[in-house]
Image (cartoon, grey):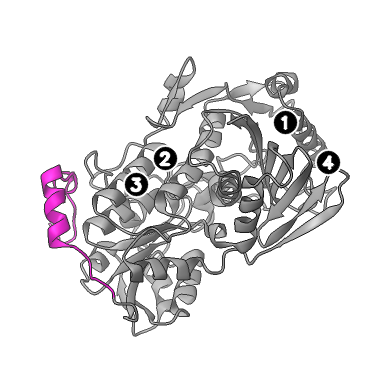
Amino acid sequence: MSKHAISRRQFLVSSAAAGAALTLFPGRVLGANERVHLGIIGLGGKGGAHFKDFSALPNVEIIAVADPDENRMKQAGPNVAQHKDFRSLLDMKDVDAVVIATPDHWHCLAAIMAFQAGKHAYVEKPVSHCIWEGYKLVEAARKYDRIVQAGTQQRSCPAVQECAADVKAETLGKVLWVHCSRLDAREPIGKVDGPQPVPEGVDYNLWAGPAPMAPIMRKSFHYDWHWQWNWGTGEMGNWGVHYLDDLRHILGWDDVPGNAIAAGNRWWDDDGETPNMHMSLMEHRGVKVVVDIRNMQDPGGGGEQGAVYLSSRQGNHIQCENGFIRIARGGGKAYDKDGKSIKQYKGDGGGAHHGNFIEALRQGSSASLNAEIAVGNMSTIMCHLANVAWRVGQDASVEEVRESMKSHADAVDTLESMLAQLGRSEVDIAKKPFVLGPKLTFDVSRGTFTDDNAAKANELVRRVDREPFIVPEQV
């Protein structure tokens, strides 16, 4: 067995062994002006962006990178240690913290292993691939007393922070409902006629990790995993998480709705599995929420338009008693009852998020983190609720979908908007109808679904990990 091979026995650490790990790998205590040494795990588009962003901060140095695709590490340059297997990066005692920018299916396990090695972590969104492992991620962060930032950078955006303060103060009265939208203009990912070869330079065993080492059924090995359930979480986890996190931030929620209904489908004939038109209706603390995520180009809206209450392709419409707020990445505005703009929220999309993490490392405390991992986990769970609610669904008529959404006018309006867009795209929903999920009830304290429709939904709460890459019961 090689130095970095992990057996099931070795990784399923007992409580006693975990306690010993805290002593063996306590992590380096950082001085106020001391240089912070980072390692980046995953050098794709987001990992490369993190490399640039963290490198630009004063007294921060990227000293190591890791990626199972050796071609992707070249961008780090010759003076940075390169590891195809990130476990050898974790062995480096001078690495203070790691930035995890792997595909979704690796986020939790890589972070837990980093904690056990005495590292702090910045974990990209969505912070988990399934509900159960997200709870284990937070549990491990607490057990090892690690400083962990979630990559939902809009938590550090001044516009969202100011908006949250105004909503808390009820400057426009109580919140009545919210429409959360991300409308994109992606293309189909294509369709292959058989398993594709592993790209040269990629260690597929390490890339797959805890996920199935399944045949590659997509033209593009990198990125298009987002749209296949073994590795990705669809657009809901890819982009929806940002605006669902904003929603929770603005409304002051420290938990998530305990219910969800979802409808939609993937109306492309390609190798993707996740829906490209996906709506979900939830309710929490008396506030109804419609989540509206679309990937299809809209011939009638320039490819990016179509949100019922938004003039752009993304963001939140927050309907209050005495007006409303529209806010997205970078800023927004508040309006009175007559639709007159009365305040502008200016933001930067969270440009200070990386610095917020570094400052917390210097302080030796999670208290100042804008997106502490428990916060990121709850926002990710909202994505999982919408995804699970759709995945347990069945083919349904438009009337059945309309009936399921009739409790909230905005949900019905969103369905009509989707139907209009599908019509403009010449989609035949008689041949490929909506998939409608039953109403699910979720117990956030237990991390499981309850009531009549729980059995099938609970099958998706936890993934069956591939040995030896297993998220342990006892972290």
- Which of labels 4 and 2 is toward the front? 2
Residue 21 spot, x, y in % from top left: 15, 55
Mark identifier at residue 138: 3
- Is 19 a magenta residue? yes
Can residue 14 be seen?
no
**Residue found at the far bottom of this picture:** 79
Above or below: residue 273 compared with residue 117: above
SS at circle 2? loop
- Which of labels 3 and 4 is toward the front? 3
Above or below: residue 282 compared with residue 172: above
Residue 26 spot, x, y in % from top left: 19, 63
Classify mark 4: residues with Cα within 10 Å, few (<14), some (14-19) or many (20+).
some
Q: Is residue 261 left or right of residue 139?
A: right
Above or below: residue 168 compared with residue 154: above
**Residue sitting at 37 percent across and 37 percent down?**
132
- Which of labels 3 and 1 is toward the front? 3
Residues at marks 2 and 3, CA–CA distance in whole angstroms: 13 Å
What amino acid type is highlighted by mark number 2?
Cys
Do tag 4 and tag 2 residues touch (Cβ < 8 Å)? no
Q: Would you name the residue on which mark 4 appears?
A: 424
Q: Earlier in the sequence, mark 3 or mark 1?
A: 3
**Residue sitting at 72 percent across and 40 percent down?**
173
Residues at marks 4 and 1, CA–CA distance in whole angstroms: 20 Å
What amino acid type is highlighted by mark number 1?
Ala
Q: Would you name the residue on which mark 1 appears?
A: 411
Mark identifier at residue 130: 2
Classify mark 3: residues with Cα within 10 Å, few (<14), some (14-19) or many (20+).
many
The quarter of the picture where the C terminus appears is top left
The magenta segment is 1-30
- Which of labels 2 and 1 is toward the front? 1
Do tag 3 and tag 4 residues touch (Cβ < 8 Å)? no
